[in-house]
Image (cartoon, helix red, strand yellow):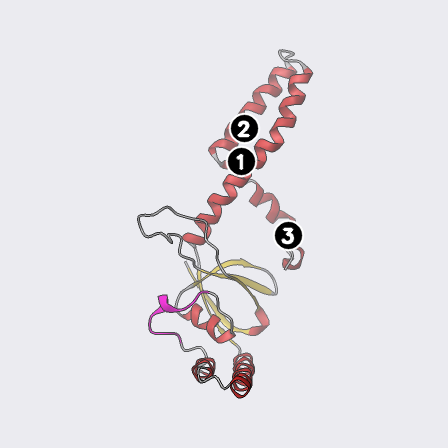
Amino acid sequence: MTLESLDLSPQFYFLRSYNGLKSPAGLALVGVLTLIMFAYLGRKVRGGIMLVAMLAAFPVLFGVSRAAARHELLLRFCRPSGRIQFALRDDLLKDAAETSADNDQSAKSNAAAPAAAPKTEAAMAGARPAQNPAALPSDAKTPQALQALSQAGRLALLLETKDRIIVFAIPNCYPLGPKGPKMVPAAHVYTLLRSDLKFTNVTP
């Protein structure tokens, strides 16, 4: 999926790019460049110094923006502001279950694998969530599994457009334990068409 396919407005990029300048490093960069500019206008520094400062601002601004993006990534994915629950259309779940059942039956007949039956049963279970929400895998591979994640409170809203919503499975930000360092999560992101949903419910 490309950014163009999300149909984002130009205001989105301007507002999000502003976050890098709100950090302490970003404010310090703006302050230093402002002082150099006023010194240049007051003819206290030469034009060469002003040119070097402008050229050096680009890599510094890149580093500031990268650090701000990583901070927002941890904040957005580790402490999401809106959890989402939804229900997929019944015909979509039925088609996915039948496809999964056909694939399992074909694999069972070809490879004579006795382990295929539990997968078929899980696929036909529809949206029934597991009793332990934490036991659900975050890499949902079927619509039933994705809906089960939403009903278990394991999905959060990432982005909304006019024809789709982008959600992600809330990851574990402390893979080394509660006392370990917070790490950049590898979250699983899913795109849902609004036409495939019966309803959605977002809670803060």
Pointers 2 and 1 in contact (C-beta within 8 Å): yes
Tag nearer the camera, 2 or 1: 1
Disc 1: which residue: 64
Q: Considering the numbered disc 2 on the image, is that residue within a helix, a strand or a loop?
A: helix
* Figure check: 94 above or below 32: below
Task: Give, as a single range, the part of the protein colored magenta.
Answer: 129-138
Q: CA distance from mark 3 to mark 1?
A: 24 Å
136 magenta-colored: yes
Lower position in the chain sequence, tag 3 or tag 1 = 3
The amino acid on which the numbered mark 3 sits, given as a three-letter code, is: Ser
Residue at 58%, 42% in the rendered image: 17
Residue at 48%, 36% in the rendered image: 23
In the picture, residue 45 is in which quadrant? top right
Lower position in the chain sequence, tag 2 or tag 1 = 2
Disc 2: which residue: 29
* Figure check: 128 above or below 186: below
